């Protein structure tokens, strides 16, 4: 067991299994069968509306499957409330309560009553320092940049210290350089805590940067799974290659520039 | 499961609120039906010429009031929209929101102080008429007061409709050199016409259920509406059979009107938004500018007149002596206490319905139909507008008079009925904020396990504090100025300020009445301004 800077021992990573999970939402129908290896970072990719976010919602417990089982560490969590599952989640937005300070927002990861002891406050400060926000405890979310707000959410993930981390496009609205920084932060946290990370992204370069495994979701089903290296190889699944398009040559790029009006 | 539990507690709260409202209204209906069944021949006999006259007058005054409010409002709104730079435009529009805040009895007093036979204009009006001015009791008084309330409301609603015309249309019109008349026909009239049925319907509805104005300005049996007749049949003639028939007729009438209104897509709550002046690209000609200015000034004088009269007449009153009077002090305390409780109840009921509606909507899968319960929490609150307070009061009055001392339950009735009547307004103030906050926080609360008391303390209260205060202040102002239920249930032992005001008017202590009206009007105005201010801060 490794010991991290704020003195919390990282829990043992848990494997995640979706066993015949079916779910319908209006017209759309989903059916997921997938396994996620313990302690790995899996990028979940696929077209809009293919069910990536629904997949995470089913694992987190925001949606209840019509049939099938969600197993975390071999235990069926179907009856557990979202907060009782061994899962932390970071959304694309609205991760913070606008009227609570940074400290309050992170402190909620320790106790939902927000009655913090001095030890709790110390832990909050350490988590904030880890994500690069040392000394910003008393700021309000509106005084932070978009990237900083997501760092606060990651600090709360550190404090909650759950073995599974779900990221639903949390960095989609950030610029490329900032997104890389945030991904590296996630990779760093993963290296310390060894949690099972699932992250939804539209950007192949994100998956390339930190993804170890890739799950390709298409039309409400898991269409392909494999290691990131295999996926981005020429031998990757056809559907996936069609989805990311031909990114091999620089021809397309130069054509695009040539067409720009001068 | 915690998810389900937190949803369930909200749904339960909504069901409790619905049952409370249903009990209040159902109890009134039960009282009416039982009374009618006790004496069916008496009820049948009550269908006489008098009843028909009253029904006809109710419709007639509402029709005239609507016409006199809406037609000028069209012109005033157009004039105001044509001149975004009119001096004091903002102030005028703000002044036009004041009648909404004024209790009807205060406005009635202002109208009397101005046009009454001892009013400020009596001398001038007498000379014009050739002889002594006889006052404005009767249809003319009712119409003036109704127009005072509804002309500004209609003007603001029409101005809002004109504000929906896209700026590009104006740019285009000015580029094409379209003059004032074709611009009206092509651009303004279509916007106004689409708002017309809703606005006219709302004004008609308000006038058909107007009680206080008719009671104080009607001045006799010749100018009596159904609601006032209900009051007379219970408080003076004590003729329960007639009261039952009158009440049923009133319910039928309002039901027909509201049904027609919802068909027309009217907004039965009436918006208090202050329209902003968009940039206009069309300049009015000289003649038109003068005409418009004259129109605006006339409307301004008409609306401001009674307000000024309230202040002037109120200052003539011996406010010091009034404040020291025992009856006034007791009435003030009673009013404040009842209005506070009523507003608290209104906000609690509204919040329960809002939370239940949201919880039900969250639980429902997208694409599936709303359950009956969700419908009830969604539109059920609007239904109480169909049942005027006097009707609810009359039903309970009839039901309770055999069981207990009717006048002893006055506080309970006033609090309950006023709370339910204020509910649609409170819901309007709170629901958008609640739904928006829930949209942002629902999943986060689930993920972090924030529920129950923690959720209320840490999440809901901070984001809903202001809209709740808005709803509370608005409900309190409504309840404070109401002279509906208390007119039926009031007695020497339980008096509110409006009730005391009515009594002073009845015993011709006009100066006292004017002083009380000033006090009451100011308090209500402050509450509504505060509500509006908090609502705007909440949006920012």
Image (cartoon, grey):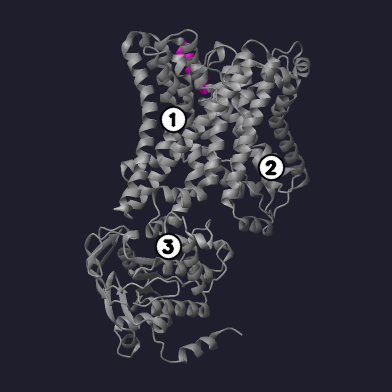
Q: Residues within 10 Å of mark 1 (few under 14, many from 20)?
A: many
Quadrant of the image containing the C terminus of chain A = bottom right
Residue lying at 53% horizontally and 39% vertically, measured from the top left:
B471
| Pick the front one: B9 or B526 | B9
Q: Position of A42 compared to B476: left or right?
A: left
Q: Which secondary structure lies at badge 2? A: helix
Q: Quadrant of residue B533?
A: top right
Q: Which residue is mark 2?
A: B79
Q: Where does the magenta region start and end?
A: B50-59
Classify residue B318 by image quadrant. Answer: top right
Q: What residue is disc 3 on?
A: A109
- In the picture of the structure, the residue carrying the numbered disc 1 is B386
Q: Main secondary structure of the magenta part?
A: helix
What SS does tag 3 mark?
A: loop
| Subunit under mark 2 | B
Residue B47 in view in this figure:
no
Q: Chain of mark 3?
A: A
């Amino acid at each position: 067991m490794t010991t991290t800077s704020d003195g919390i021992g990282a829990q043992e990573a848990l494997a995640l299994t979706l066993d015949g999970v079916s779910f319908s939402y209006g017209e759309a129908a989903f059916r997921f069968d997938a396994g996620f290896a313990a302690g790995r970072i899996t990028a979940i990719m696929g077209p809009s509306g293919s069910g990536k976010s629904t997949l995470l919602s089913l694992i987190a417990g925001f949606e209840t499957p019509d049939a099938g089982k969600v197993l975390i560490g071999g235990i069926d969590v179907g009856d557990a409330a979202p907060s009782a599952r061994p899962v932390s989640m970071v959304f694309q937005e609205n991760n913070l309560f606008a009227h609570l300070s940074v400290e309050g927002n992170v402190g909620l990861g320790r106790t939902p009553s927000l009655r913090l002891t001095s030890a709790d406050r110390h832990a909050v400060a350490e988590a904030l320092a880890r994500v690069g926000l040392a000394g910003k405890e008393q700021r309000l979310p509106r005084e932070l940049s978009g990237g900083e707000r997501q760092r606060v959410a990651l600090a709360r993930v550190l404090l909650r210290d759950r073995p599974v981390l779900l990221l639903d496009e949390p960095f989609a609205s950030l610029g490329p350089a900032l997104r890389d920084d945030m991904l590296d932060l996630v990779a760093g946290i993963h290296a310390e805590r060894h949690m099972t990370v699932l992250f939804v992204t539209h950007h192949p370069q994100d998956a390339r940067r930190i993804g170890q495994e890739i799950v390709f979701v298409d039309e409400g089903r898991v269409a392909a799974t494999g290691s990131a290296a295999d996926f981005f190889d020429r031998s990757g699944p056809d559907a996936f290659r069609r989805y990311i398009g031909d990114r091999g040559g620089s021809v397309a790029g130069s054509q695009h520039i040539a067409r720009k009006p001068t | 499961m915690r998810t389900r539990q937190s949803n369930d507690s909200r749904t339960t709260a909504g069901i409790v609120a619905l049952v409370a409202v249903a009990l209040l209204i159902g109890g009134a209906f039960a009282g009416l039906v039982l009374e009618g069944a006790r004496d069916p021949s008496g009820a049948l006999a009550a269908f006489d010429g008098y009843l028909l006259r009253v029904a006809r007058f109710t419709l007639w005054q509402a029709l005239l009031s609507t016409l006199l409010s809406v037609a000028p409002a069209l012109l005033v709104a157009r004039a105001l929209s044509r001149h975004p730079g009119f001096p004091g435009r903002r102030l005028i529009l703000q002044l036009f929101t004041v009648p909404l805040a004024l209790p009807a009895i205060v406005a009635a007093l202002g109208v009397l102080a101005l046009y009454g036979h001892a009013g400020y204009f009596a001398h001038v009006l007498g000379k014009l008429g050739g002889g002594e001015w006889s006052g404005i009791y009767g249809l003319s008084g009712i119409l003036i007061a109704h127009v005072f309330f509804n002309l500004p409301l209609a003007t603001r609603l029409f101005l809002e409709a004109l504000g929906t015309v896209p700026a590009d249309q104006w740019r285009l019109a000015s580029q094409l050199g379209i003059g004032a008349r074709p611009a009206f026909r092509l651009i303004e009239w279509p916007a106004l016409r689409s708002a017309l049925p809703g606005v006219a319907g709302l004004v008609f509805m308000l006038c058909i259920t107007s009680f206080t104005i008719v009671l104080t300005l009607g001045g006799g049996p010749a100018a009596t509406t159904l609601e006032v007749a209900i009051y007379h049949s219970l408080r003076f003639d004590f003729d329960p059979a007639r009261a039952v028939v009158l009440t049923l007729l009133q319910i039928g009438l309002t039901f027909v009107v509201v049904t027609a209104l919802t068909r027309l897509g009217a907004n039965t709550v009436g918006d208090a938004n202050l329209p902003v002046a968009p940039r206009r690209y069309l300049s009015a000609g000289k003649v038109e500018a003068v005409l418009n200015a004259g129109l605006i000034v006339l409307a301004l004088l008409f609306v401001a007149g009674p307000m000024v009269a309230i202040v002037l007449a109120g200052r003539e009153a011996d406010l010091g002596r009034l404040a020291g009077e025992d009856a006034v002090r007791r009435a003030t305390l009673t009013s404040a206490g009842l209005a506070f409780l009523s507003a608290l109840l209104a906000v609690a009921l509204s919040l329960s319905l809002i939370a239940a509606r949201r919880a039900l909507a969250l639980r429902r899968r997208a694409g599936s139909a709303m359950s009956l319960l969700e419908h009830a929490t969604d539109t059920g609150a609007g239904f109480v507008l169909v049942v005027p307070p006097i009707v609810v009061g009359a039903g309970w009055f009839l039901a309770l008079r055999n069981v207990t001392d009717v006048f002893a339950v006055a506080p309970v009735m006033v609090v309950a009925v006023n709370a339910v009547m204020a509910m649609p307004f409170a819901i309007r103030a709170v629901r958008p904020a609640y739904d928006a906050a829930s949209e942002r926080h629902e999943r986060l609360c689930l993920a972090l396990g924030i529920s129950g008391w923690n959720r209320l303390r840490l999440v809901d209260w901070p984001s809903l504090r202001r809209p709740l205060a808005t709803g509370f202040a608005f409900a309190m102002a409504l309840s404070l100025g109401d002279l509906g239920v208390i007119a039926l249930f009031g007695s020497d032992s339980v008096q509110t300020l409006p009730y005391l005001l009515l009594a002073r008017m009845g015993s011709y202590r006009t100066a006292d009445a004017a002083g009380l009206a000033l006090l009451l009007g100011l308090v209500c105005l402050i509450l509504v301004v505060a509500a509006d201010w908090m609502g705007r801060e909440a949006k920012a």
